[in-house]
Amino acid sequence: MNYYIKYFGCDMNKSDSERVSSIFESMKMKKTENISEADVIAILACSVRQSAVNRVYEIFRKKKIKKSAIRILTGCVLKKDTQKLQKIFDIIIDITRIKDLPKIIKENKFYSYNPENVEYFDIIPRQKNNFSALIPISNGCNQFCTYCAVPYTRGIEKNRSAYSILSEIKQLPQNIKQITLLGQTVNSYINPDKNSKIKNFSDLLETVAKLKKDTWIGFTSPYPTKFTDKLIKIIAKYNNISNHIHIPLQSGSDKILKLMNRKYTSYQFLEIINKIYKLIPDANITTDVIVGFCNETEKDFSDTLDVLKKSKITLVYSGLYSPRPETLAYKIYNDNVSQSTKRKRDEKMTKLIGKQSLERNKKYLGNVVKVLVSSKSKKGIYLGKMQTHETVKIFNATDYDLGRIVNVKIDKTLEWGLEGKIIK
Ligand code: SF4
């Protein structure tokens, strides 16, 4: 039997898809990239944005699919979306129950929901590439930002034991060059094992950095107020912990942050950023912004631009606000910023960030930097990432270099990346 798998959304869904693949492989199924050849089709959907939900329908609308194919829906899905999507799926299963898939596939339709369960993290994932590993350390979220579906799709935060996390890391293949610790608010991690010396996220990060000295260590996504002084010191102390710090701002307006139930002000956010730059001057800071949240005025948006400037952010993962069922914002606020205003503000922000990114990139001109070669484009150009997350186009790489860390001399700097050649 062949299986086809597709995930939408964030790295947590990507990591979960590796665990689902692992289950299928244990059932002796073979992965196919061609959906029309598949006997089992698994979709890890994402309810965080309406556009991602719409794309699930498109998969089945556009592609030829075997009539007998079993269609499985899992991932990060709101109950309302599940109810709508159930017409096009045979099996709907909570991600925490995927260990039951072999049994469920043999039976009939089934839906189970058990967000308390983090045991599924024990399934050893089948990594898509063999040089970077996503390691979930927690699941769910306690923050209840008013726009966000995650507390309703994944439930409240459940932390995996440090023992289980470290066991998975110890079992990683030798050639893994990069590890990313994952959690919705990764730095609020508390080890449920009270007898362990590892108490919190800083302890865990330090332990991983010591355990994997030759591996680049990163994490995503932290919550700003959980970014402690101790955590900043640990990032500064270990060379193998990435100086790329992704720290979600969402808005630079205190009024909007309050409406979003984000528990910090723009001043507090900037204080954290300043502390990071003080100890890690080379930090490459990126963020998330929601554009056009309910009641966002031009002044609120310009406050956001102001924070982005002051924090010298080089990349924003922006989303135009779209109300998600079950969230508080959906229930009590009006989505009263027009799509065209949202788009215009997004374009303005992209221009600003492009300039800031170029400013940072310029300093690499003529330098030799370390790059992990991660992919080859359809046009045959190799792409890689620096430890600080800058994207580098490499013109003289070969397939041999994929998954390796190489020295690249930078001969061109652009808004969104760098270009260069490998030097021996
Ligand atoms: S911190 Fe807020 S935005 Fe992030 S997952 Fe939790 S509720 Fe969603």
Image: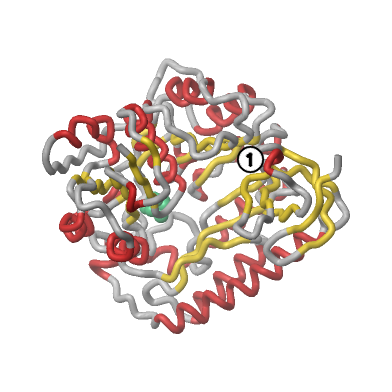
Q: Is residue 154 above or below residue 170?
A: below
Q: Nearer the viewer, residue 180 or 294?
A: 180
In the rendered image, residue 209, in percent from the top left (x then y), is placed at 62, 28
Find residue 8 and report its image quarter: bottom left
Q: Is residue 338 above or below residue 24?
A: below
In the rendered image, residue 303, in percent from the top left (x then y), is placed at 56, 72
* Residue displayed at 34% across by 27% down: 26
Q: Is residue 258 above or below residue 243?
A: below
65 with respect to 186 (left or right): left
Q: Which residue is mark 1?
A: 232
In the rendered image, residue 202, in percent from the top left (x then y), is placed at 55, 32
| 10 Å crowding of disc 1: few (<14), some (14-19), many (20+) | some
109 with respect to 175 (left or right): left
Q: How many marks?
A: 1
Residue furthest toward the left?
A: 108
Image quadrant where one finds the N terminus: top left
